[in-house]
Amino acid sequence: MAAAGAEFEVNAKALALLWEPRATPSRGPRPTLSLEAIARAGIEIADIGGLAAVTMQRVAAALDVTKMALYRYVPGKVELVALMVDMGVGEAPDLDAVPGGWRQRLHEWALRMFDRFWRHPWALEATVGTRAIGPNELGWLEQGVAALAGTGLGGAEMLDVAATLLGHVRGVAQQGTAMASGTPERAMVTTLAGLLRGREGRYPAVVAALDAAAEQGAQDKALDFGIARILDGVELLIAGVPDRTRPPARRVRRGTPRT
Amino acid sequence: MAAAGAEFEVNAKALALLWEPRATPSRGPRPTLSLEAIARAGIEIADIGGLAAVTMQRVAAALDVTKMALYRYVPGKVELVALMVDMGVGEAPDLDAVPGGWRQRLHEWALRMFDRFWRHPWALEATVGTRAIGPNELGWLEQGVAALAGTGLGGAEMLDVAATLLGHVRGVAQQGTAMASGTPERAMVTTLAGLLRGREGRYPAVVAALDAAAEQGAQDKALDFGIARILDGVELLIAGVPDRTRPPARRVRRGTPRT
DNA sequence: CGTGTCTAGAGTACACTGTATCCATAAGAC
DNA sequence: GTCTTATGGATACAGTGTACTCTAGACACG
């Protein structure tokens, strides 16, 4: 717990920046910048050149100030990136308007999240490791969990479902954006094909899978595929069908789930 | 495709380092270092201080040389990190010895992969974005796909199953290692609880989920939960049960799957 | 209105980072 | 023994994030 406390300490500045309103000074020169403008400049640079391209110098240049001026607004680069992430993911969608039940809503939730990462691939890098989470990001989790309300799942299970879908979305986005080609599927095939050339004997299963995929025309959609598998599994759980690794008595269902 | 070619160009040095044997010189001073020693030094530094702690200077100091000496062995830092990743994930497990069928094997595959990331959390950061993939990493994919051989899944589907599981494993590992506390579940609860303090009205679903999880004693295991959901969904697919978003005629099964 | 206080932005400095390049020496080929 | 090659160190440099100081702008207050 001491270690956890230390971690919290490290992120205090980012948390304050993300969650607390910025004090407006009553004296002194009028600020020419704003947190929003700074974060937006950072996002634009990252969208073009990736996260590594975001330097205080470049952000400042984009805003026609010297880099040290940025420190009047953000305590450091880490905090700037945290701000960019929260602005990049944007506000969570309102899933109430999605027709259907929990499944359709979760599917839509996942698709839209994928869209965020697809638009801002740098956010994948920026959201690894110890970091502060902002209001928008937490809003996405809120909508995901809310979509599962009334399904009969326990609190921890709902969080886990959201996390599993998020992991999948990230994985596919990661794969797709790692190569500047059209789709995640194309990206994987291209990457693997290149790697396997001349080494087919070492990786027979992957080679066979790639060959088979090529024959089938590779129309498979990795994102939808994975979402469907996950949601199928979740649906079984909600319906009270025991998964195959546990004895049937493990789960007791109360009432009929709404779909 | 031109863009894809450019990407391949960028990674050529890393690919050569990962995949091609190192030429042994016939003249000149004997090398005091090796690729393995350098990568190991990098891994040890990263294990303690994260990926950012890995600098050429620190790696060199750990090996009692100056940093420029490293460039005799690796073309640059990016390539060093690629080497570290491949060594960090290590050789893929032999799943043939795992009793049971495809499901048990995949489950074991996922657990072991999680273990790799848990031991080397920096690898999560190091495996985002454009990068070169090494023999060990490809070996893990090979084992995952091989576990699905004979299930009747198509080539692309097998790759997608592996990718979905990998995404989930990464997500849970990411969440758990982002805070230096015991488990991924504890990490999520702690993080969210802190964020929600005083903001409960804004995120009612998450608050309710956390409260419910606390009541249930939070014994849920996020990793196993997600793996089970995914594998349940895959099992339905293999068994030829249509998922609920598609018409029943979509899939035609040939023969009985082996489990 | 004048004075005092506070704050924004620029300028300067510095430790650190990755990498290009040159030099001296060690080790093997011939 | 001479020549060639390769290792490691030394030096330099552009770039990075951030600490700190100074100047001038803007507001509070009497």
Image (spheres, coloured by chain):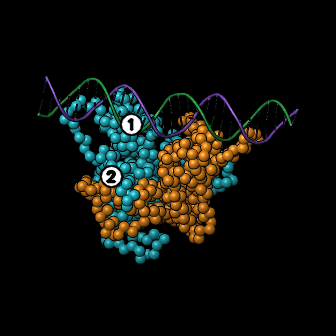
Chain colours: A orange, B cyan, C green, D purple
- Give whichever of B167, B76 is nearer the camera: B76
The chain under label 2 reads: B
Q: Considering the numbered disc 1 on the image, is that residue within a helix, a strand or a loop?
A: helix
How many neighbours does mark 2 have within 10 angstroms: few (below 14), some (14-19), or many (20 or more)?
A: many
> Which picture quadrant has residue C25?
top left
- Please report the residue visible at 48 percent of the width from the left and 51 percent of the height from the top: A49
Quarter of the figure with the N terminus of chain A: top right
- Give whichever of A5, D14 is nearer the camera: D14
Query: Contact (CB < 8 A) between labels 2 and 1?
Result: no
**Tag shown at residue B42:** 1
Q: Considering the numbered disc 2 on the image, is that residue within a helix, a strand or a loop?
A: helix
How many neighbours does mark 1 have within 10 angstroms: few (below 14), some (14-19), or many (20 or more)?
A: many
- Give whichever of B230, B140 is nearer the camera: B140
Of tags 2 and 1, the one toward the viewer is: 1
Q: Please say whether residue B123 is visible from this viewpoint.
A: yes
- Asked if marks 2 and 1 fall on the same chain, the answer is yes
The CA distance from mark 2 to mark 1 is 21 Å
